[in-house]
Image (spheres, coloured by chain):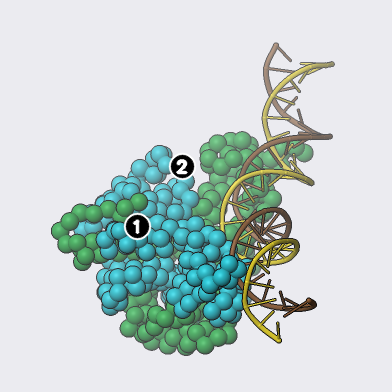
Chain colours: A cyan, B green, C yellow, D brown
Amino acid sequence: MRLAELSERSGVSTATIKYYLREGLLPPGERVSATQAEYDEEHLRRLRLVRALVQVGRVPVATAREVLAAVADESADQLSRLGTAVAALPPGPHGPGEDEAALLAERRAGELQERLGWRIVRSNPAHVTLVSALSALIRLGYPCEMEHLLPYGEVAARLAGHDIALIEEFDAPTTQLEAAVALTVLYEPVLLSLRRLAQAEEATRRFRPGTGGGTGD
Amino acid sequence: MRLAELSERSGVSTATIKYYLREGLLPPGERVSATQAEYDEEHLRRLRLVRALVQVGRVPVATAREVLAAVADESADQLSRLGTAVAALPPGPHGPGEDEAALLAERRAGELQERLGWRIVRSNPAHVTLVSALSALIRLGYPCEMEHLLPYGEVAARLAGHDIALIEEFDAPTTQLEAAVALTVLYEPVLLSLRRLAQAEEATRRFRPGTGGGTGD
DNA sequence: ACACCTTGGATAGCGTCACTATCCATGATT
DNA sequence: AATCATGGATAGTGACGCTATCCAAGGTGT
């Protein structure tokens, strides 16, 4: 198929597809003449993935490129590729690093992971994000004690077990890696919105038992 | 204290504080003369909250204004304020709305919430976000079956119960609302990064048992 | 008292990001 | 042969979160 058709079938404008091609998020089409290229179902699949990552998962375009490159990198083993791919995911601007709150947060994060029996990898971006979020909470005066954090950790462990099992159902290695990226990223909004919905439900029950009520607008 | 001191103690530049004042994220200082204003500890607290919401929670500035306005709105009851505040939180760009995937997603979201015994409020932004995330998954060919979604829902319910209990520990109503906002938003990165860490842990265990391994940044 | 400095308010600019609109030459189509 | 579509390059757009520069009024030190 041509660019125009790829655009129609994906619902993404040709201009945007060209942009993704330029940015290396999409492999170039197969050149069929000096001025035309042919795209296939694989391009369509990839385009949909990119779209979902960028729009739903809010992954920056540059990051998506790295993640997808890691997924496709034939030279590395499965686990490294997975690690590189998922590790590249959300940088998240981190505040200033060396104050008291940050140190306490670092310790808390360590204790929590130790308690859960996880390896602590300080270079893991997720670890960095965790520490910076805990720092923010501490600076605001919320304590972040073990008893508050543990439920989150346990729940995360449960979900991760579930996620990995789901990923293992795919057999082709690249498919599996893509699934890992897609499920990691796309289940984030699912999880967050479910938490918000559950909060609304719980709040309604506690504060106004028996009455139906919306959320506002 | 003056602007300069507020800036020093919060680590936020005076230019940025002025910007927040302009945007209504921070109440104006008490005018002590035609050209000077006095700020107090409350301003400092509020500034830190804004900072955490915007930088760590990635809440858009305009949204933060609405949320904080709802928190402070004396005319409404506690629950409406909470609802309005939390509902305003993350809009999230939603893809095109009326295709097959969206309809299926809407049904799935409904089934899930029904199954969990939650009220379904279609106007809730979290519901909209949920549907749009599920649509994306469906479009990518991931099924989103009940068995996959239920664990997420159950986990969300568990966390929400925990969250609300935590919030109830605060007694002043405004403090409580602020805590609700702060904890809702700031525990999101905590939850997400814990999930990523748990995934890394689980993946390492399954794919390379017994070996330590980083994430390869 | 008088020069000097700071303050808060207003306005305009900057850098990033994800697109998007415009051109253009080539080559396909009728 | 005339027309049109295609893909590639380049520049522009709009939103966002600041940031830099002015300015006049007012406080401060000697």
- Report crowding for label 1: few under 14, some 14 to 19, many 20 or more residues within 10 A (C-alpha): many
Residue plotted at (46% across, 42% down)? A96
Q: Secondary structure at mark 2?
A: loop
> Is any atom of residue A147 visible in this view?
no
The residue lying toward the viewer, choosing from A61 and A116, is A61
Q: Check the image and report above or below for B212 versus A82.
A: above
Q: Is residue A171 visible?
A: yes
Where residue B80 sits: x, y (%)?
57, 72
> Which residue matches tag 2?
A96
Q: Which mark is residue B121?
A: none
Q: Amino acid at mark 1?
A: Thr
* Chain of the residue under the numbered disc 2 shown in the image: A
- Front disc: 1 or 2: 1
Label whose residue precedes the other's in the sequence (1 or 2):
1
Task: Please tell me which residue is depicted at 37% across the width and 64% down the height of the picture.
Answer: A72
The subunit carrying tag 1 is A
Name the residue nearer the viewer: A127 or B126: A127
Of B72 and A94, nearer the camera is A94
SS assignment at label 1: helix
Cα distance, mark 1 to mark 2?
A: 25 Å
- Residue located 39% across and 44% down the image: A102
Asked which quadrant contains residue B189, the reply is bottom left
Q: Could you tell me which residue is drawn at 46 percent across and 78 percent down?
A: A41
Image location (x, y in percent) of residue A60: 50, 59
